[in-house]
């Protein structure tokens, strides 16, 4: 399913939670935000709404790397044809930049960017002594490198995400945040179970994809 669909389902989960728990406008907004975000996070292991901006940035970085290599190569050629001795540093950097632009896949750059963001979040969690933030940073840094619809699309990922939500709940002292986070995440897996590819709920115990045909 598309990211927009997952987001809509997650928001619906959050809206239901705002009715179930004692209602305040702030709490309702929080439940909807947590559930909607949780419904998207399972797809950090592949192209999604959350990684779309990083994908655009990674494409820009790759193109800049290539063109920087061309520019430096042009400088080397200029020195050569004007009887100046080109610097070995220029030659080496030009070759390196050009080769990096050729071999670097946009997905790899995106994953590195996501991991950098995750590491920053982990440091923030350490600095402010928020264990749940450290856990979220670790999740964000590690998950982009996993195979799409792999470990993030399993039943085991739900309690892990719930533990992060539990930390946030204790931080905010607002009842139900952890449950809402888990249900939002779980809604993603259930929705993907309705697709032709299904979900490997019990991976790595079994690689069987569970699917429901409507």
Image (cartoon, helix red, strand yellow):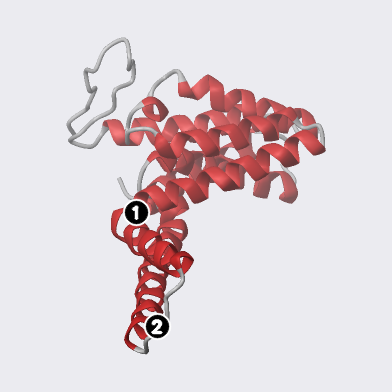
Query: Dot 1: within a 10 Å radius of its alpha carbon, few (fewer than 14), some, or many (20 or more) residues?
Result: some
Q: In terms of image quadrants, where is residue 23?
A: top right
Q: Secondary structure at mark 2?
A: helix
Tell me the residue at 46%/57% (across/down): 54
What is the C-alpha distance between the residues marked 1 and 2? 28 Å
Point out residue 180 in the picture as x, y percentages from the top left corner: 59, 32
Q: Secondary structure at mark 1?
A: loop
Residue at the disc numbered 2: 79
Q: Nearer the viewer, mark 1 or mark 2?
A: 2
Point out residue 211 in the picture as x, y percentages from the top left corner: 22, 26
Tell me the residue at 41%/29% (across/down): 152
Residue 127 appears in view: yes
Point out residue 12 in the picture as x, y percentages from the top left corner: 49, 44
Residue 15 appears in view: no
The one nearer the camera, 188 or 157, is 157
Give the quadrant of the C terminus.
top left
Tell me the residue at 74%/36% (across/down): 125
The one nearer the camera, 204 or 159, is 204
User: Of the numbered discs in the image, which one, if any, rests on residue 104?
Assistant: 1
Check if mark 1's residue and mark 2's residue have beta carbons within 8 Å: no
Q: In terms of image quadrants, where is residue 84?
A: bottom left
Query: Dot 2: within a 10 Å radius of its alpha carbon, few (fewer than 14), some, or many (20 or more) residues?
Result: some
Q: In the figure, is residue 72 to the left or right of 119?
A: left
Tell me the residue at 43%/40% (across/down): 144
Point out residue 22 in the picture as x, y percentages from the top left corner: 73, 36
């Amino acid at each position: 399913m598309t990211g927009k669909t997952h987001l809509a389902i997650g928001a619906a989960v959050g809206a239901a939670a705002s009715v179930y728990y004692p209602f305040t406008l702030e709490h309702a907004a929080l439940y909807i935000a947590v559930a909607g975000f949780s419904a998207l996070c399972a797809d950090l292991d592949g192209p999604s709404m959350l990684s779309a901006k990083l994908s655009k940035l990674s494409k820009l970085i790759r193109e800049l790397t290539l063109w920087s290599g061309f520019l430096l190569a042009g400088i080397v050629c200029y020195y050569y044809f004007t009887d100046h001795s080109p610097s070995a540093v220029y030659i080496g950097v030009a070759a390196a930049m050009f080769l990096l632009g050729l071999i670097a896949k946009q997905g790899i750059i995106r994953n590195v960017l996501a991991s950098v963001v995750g590491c920053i979040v982990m440091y923030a969690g350490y600095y402010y002594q928020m264990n749940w933030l450290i856990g979220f940073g670790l999740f964000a840094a590690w998950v982009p490198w996993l195979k799409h619809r792999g470990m993030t699309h399993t039943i085991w990922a739900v309690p892990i995400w719930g533990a992060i939500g539990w930390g946030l709940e204790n931080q905010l002292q607002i009842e139900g945040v952890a449950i809402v986070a888990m249900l939002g995440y779980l809604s993603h897996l259930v929705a993907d179970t309705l697709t032709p590819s299904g979900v490997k709920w019990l991976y790595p115990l079994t690689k069987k994809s569970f699917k429901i045909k409507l």
